[in-house]
Amino acid sequence: MKQRIPAFLQPGDTIGISATARFATQESISIATSFIEAAGFKVHYDLGILKQHHQLAGTIEERVAHFNALVHHPEVKAIWNVRGGYGSAEIVDAVDWAALQENPKWLVGFSDFTTFLCHGVQQGLATLHAAMPISFETTNSEALNATFDVLQGAEDALHCAIPKDLSGQVIAGNLSVIASILGTPSLPNLDRCILLLEDLDEYHYHLDRMLLTLKRRGAFKKLAAVVLGEFSDIHDHTIPWGEDVGLTLRKHFEAEGVPIYEHPIIGHGKENWPIILRAV
């Protein structure tokens, strides 16, 4: 499916801050406001996203209400999730996607927000995989500036990682999240897709298990290509799972004959560049 691209932002437009999973902090909101305003945009958020319900930014009902309020806000042109964690999948089905289809807005984030990015693609909307306010201060400034440029119509960074003549549906995100939404309405069919993957704080064998599950379900059989981004803070046991994480990541795609590219274009480190999820 070819995605409908939301209107690109103009200087002075309003960006809404959401919290679909972990709770926001005043510090993260202040960081978001500082960077977004410096880029020439206004910021809007509901004070309710500062509420803490255990690890989350409120109950399911509260998080749905806060997100849908941004969907319906007439001045909000993009919705940027403040952080990841876990919890986005609990509320994704209750979002007013019909309203977003009628009036598309950019959905921006990564990590646990991968669920929203992929679900948006399923709803026929282009979305943006990019750094979130929680990591603005540690993200490469060029990558963050590029994100604001992409929101205003510039080319994204995909061309840095793959040949220019490679085409397909672009899906980018966190491996753990993509594995968790396999078989749900949130994960697009990966046939002829260019798949970009990253992950953080996982055990080496967990990576193998998730990739094996995806491969056994046939998810890689018709991939156009895979880009292996940054896999950071990967753990192992006293007896290592394997010689090298890279070998573990590559072997499942090599078994299916999928072209593999390795580039730290996305991830939880500083090199988190903007990638639009859409058909190219």
Image (cartoon, rainbow, N blue to C red):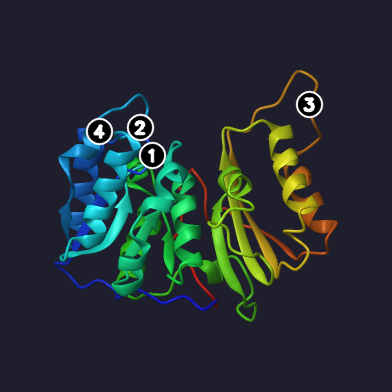
Residue at 38 percent across and 39 percent down: it is 21
Residue bearing mark 1: 21
Q: On the rendered image, what quadrant is the N terminus found in? A: bottom right
Question: What is the total number of numbered labels drawn onto the structure image?
Answer: 4
Mark 3 neighbour class, 10 Å CA radius: few under 14, some 14 to 19, many 20 or more: few
Q: Earlier in the sequence, mark 2 or mark 4?
A: 4
**In the rendered structure, which amino acid carries the disc numbered 3?**
Pro
Residue bearing mark 4: 25
Residue bearing mark 3: 240
Q: Could you give the CA–CA distance between mark 3 and mark 1, rounded to whole angstroms?
A: 32 Å
Q: Nearer the viewer, residue 197 or 6?
A: 6
Q: Earlier in the sequence, mark 3 or mark 2?
A: 2
- Find residue 252 and report its horizontal and vertical position in percent: 79, 51
Residue at 17 percent across and 70 percent down: it is 11
Residue bearing mark 2: 56
- Find residue 10 and report its horizontal and vertical position in percent: 20, 73
Q: Could you give the CA–CA distance between mark 4 and mark 1, rounded to whole angstroms?
A: 12 Å
User: In the figure, residue 6 lies in which quadrant?
Assistant: bottom left
Question: Which of labels 3 and 1 is toward the front?
Answer: 1
65 to the left or right of 180: left
**In the rendered structure, which amino acid carries the disc numbered 1?**
Ala
- Find residue 71 and report its horizontal and vertical position in percent: 26, 60
Residue at 27 percent across and 39 percent down: it is 62
Q: Could you give the CA–CA distance between mark 2 and mark 4, rounded to whole angstroms?
A: 11 Å
**In the rendered structure, which amino acid carries the disc numbered 4?**
Thr
Q: On the rendered image, what quadrant is the C terminus found in? A: bottom right
| In the depicted structure, whether residue 267 falls above or below residue 258 | above
Q: Earlier in the sequence, mark 4 or mark 3?
A: 4
